[in-house]
Amino acid sequence: MPRMNAARKHPVDFTLNGRTVLAEAENRMLLSDLLRHELGLTGTHVGCEHGVCGACTVQIDGKPARACLTLAQQVRGSDVRTVEALSPDPAVLSPLQAAFRRHHGLQCGFCTPGILMSLDALLRERPGAGREDIREHLSGHLCRCTGYATIVEAALAAAEEQRKEEKPNA
């Protein structure tokens, strides 16, 4: 690992939502701060800043990760996805986002980006995820709105829609 000077910024290159990014970050800069303050992607929210609430969840190389616990320098060479990547067209919701809207899973919306990124990773990895899989996956999120029932229903609907798209005659 290259020796870094703590007093200055260092380059960090990675793929962000499908695009190559070359940014600069101090050694102690968190990924959440790089995304929000340097790159202007404010969809990633910061809640507890201790990795407990999950509001800052992004995907690093396809796996959910807490952006508030990840140093920006740690994503060098990685593929980072934020909630902005869920839909290729900002005017059109992804199937998961649309299901959240239909089933009122958005609640106040603050935790929603992190929850969406966790569920997106789950449904990519296990398209047949059921209610218990979804509940277990949501256990890493603390939402003060307290209502996970609509989120689970939305995720189940999105999973069902995903299965139908994969097998159109099913």
Image (tube, helix red, strand yellow):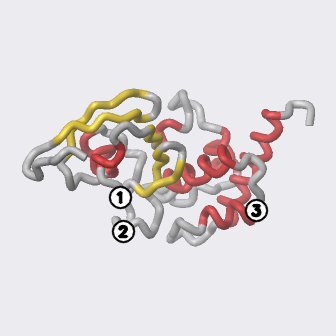
- Disc 3 to disc 1, C-alpha distance: 28 Å
Residue 154 relative to residue 79: left or right: right
> At x 37% / y 37%, what residue is drawn?
77
Q: Earlier in the sequence, mark 1 or mark 2?
A: 2
Q: Amino acid at mark 2?
A: His
**Which residue is the site of mark 2?**
50
- Label 1 sits on a secondary structure element that is loop
Look at the numbered discs 1 and 2 and tell me whether their residues touch, using CB distance below 8 Å: yes
Residue 68's mark? 1
The residue lying toward the viewer, choosing from 33 and 92, is 33
Image quadrant in which you'd find residue 153: bottom right
> Would you call the spot at circle 1 few (<14 residues within 10 Å), some (14-19), or many (20 or more)?
many
The kind of residue tagged 1 is Cys
Q: Which mark is residue 131?
A: 3
Q: Residue at x 47, y 62 (%)?
A: 54
Q: Earlier in the sequence, mark 2 or mark 3?
A: 2
Q: Secondary structure at mark 2?
A: loop
Residue 38, given in percent of the width and then of the height, sits at 25, 41
What residue is shown at x 40% (from left), y 33% (from top)? 15
151 in relation to 163, above or below:
below
Q: Residue furthest left?
A: 7
Q: Quadrant of the C terminus?
A: top right
Nearest the eye: 116 or 91 = 116
